[in-house]
Amino acid sequence: MRLSEFIVAHVDRIVDEWESFAKTIKPAADSMSSTELRDHAKAILLGAARDMNTAQTKSEQAAKAKGEDLKKTPSLDEAAASHGELRHIVGFDLVQMTSEFRHLRASVIRLWVDNLKTPDLAYFTDMIRFNEAIDEALAESTAAYADQVTRSRDIFLAILGHDLRAPLQAVSMSTDLLALKAKLDEPCRAHLARIRMGTQHMGSMVSDLLEFVRSRLGASLPVERKRMDFGEACREAIDEASAGHPGTYPVLSVQGDTTGMWDRGRINQLLQNLIGNALQHGAASREITIRITGEENNVELVVHNLGNPIAEDAIGSIFDPLVRSNTAEHPSKGPTTSLGLGLFIVKEVVNAHGGSITVTSNVNDGTTFTVVLPKSV
């Protein structure tokens, strides 16, 4: 009997062995019913049998051996993906889930070989096709499991970031009330100022974390466009960013009409991160320049600082999440509270407004970020 025929004829017996093995996976299996333990096993086996009976050229066989997606058996892929998702939900770890496929492969081959009476050359082809089908199912199941792990982590981070806002707000409000009502001496006021600044840094980190998670969960940054003056927003952002860097104040140049339809909150995020990045990494003795040019259909923002350039091999990934914009020779000036999300948020804000951003950095010219945003949708 050919292997595909054997699988169809003995599918319930094979699934019984699958269930028996799944019961040994503790502690997740302790609370699972027979239906949950047998989850998608029959569909995976029948999908594998259908795949084995599908004609396959030598080139297709070679492609499949390399893991290329030929989309021959959607039912197999769907069953395997659903299995991976559900195994994650009930508490199997990745090693435990993949061990089910290892046991399934061994069980089918063992039961089939025990049933054979005379060897046949075609049986070797059957084993190759069966192994390909199981590998395909395992790949789909593992990918789906990994997606669920990533999504669960992102949801956890979203909840964490959201819940951190309340205690941070309480600390911030209490600090403001103490500054207004309490009669504090100068040292105490200095301590209070440090608490306020630390709270602001933490609030910024939480906001960046939430924006990062939002993008990971597949949602683009929402924007609420209203008419605003980009130059005015930049002046306010400079004042706010410079408060944390005494003695450093960027030089601003505004030319042309800089009004347009943008989301004021998002633009403030963009400006704070770009200006803060320049203040953090620019040479302390050299000025930071910001130029805003209003043109007919767009506005251009250029933020420039001198100092150690961004490492050449880091330019390509500088807008990726959790990547810090370290310079070629020195990490940064002093301690930082950054999560490595600032420039990622900048890129997301630019994309949400339909704009573009580029960066150049070298020893002679310094580092320049250039943002171009359309004035209207």
Image (cartoon, helix red, strand yellow):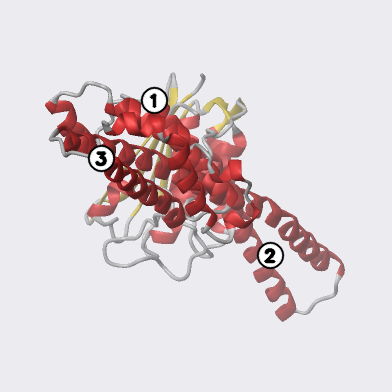
The image's mark for residue 74 is 1
**Mark 1 residue type:** Pro
**Mark 2 residue type:** Arg
Q: Nearer the viewer, residue 293 or 211?
A: 211
User: Is the C-beta separation of discs 1 and 3 under 8 Å?
Assistant: no
Please provide percent x and percent y for residue 56. 20, 24
Please provide percent x and percent y for residue 32. 62, 50
**Mark 3 residue type:** Leu
Q: Secondary structure at mark 3?
A: loop
Q: Residues within 10 Å of mark 1 (few under 14, many from 20)?
A: few
Q: Residues within 10 Å of mark 2 (few under 14, many from 20)?
A: some
- Does 212 sit left or right of 198 as displayed? left
Please identify, in this view, whether the residue under mark 1 or under mark 3 is nearer the observer.
3
Residue at 49 percent across and 23 percent down: it is 375
What whole-number distance in Å separates the C-alpha atoms at marks 3 and 2? 78 Å
Is residue 285 at least partly visible in the picture?
yes
- Quarter occupied by the N terminus: top left
Q: Residue furthest front?
A: 117
Q: Nearer the viewer, residue 234 or 45?
A: 45
Q: Secondary structure at mark 1?
A: helix
What whole-number distance in Å separates the C-alpha atoms at marks 1 and 3? 30 Å
Please identify, in this view, whether the residue under mark 2 or under mark 1 is nearer the observer.
1
Is 119 situated above or below 314? above
Pointer 1 or 3: first along the chain: 1
Is residue 253 at least partly visible in the picture?
no
Q: Which residue is mark 3?
A: 116
Is 343 situated above or below 81? below
Q: Which residue is mark 2?
A: 196
Pointer 3 or 2: first along the chain: 3
Q: Secondary structure at mark 2?
A: helix
Quarter residue 306 falls in: bottom left
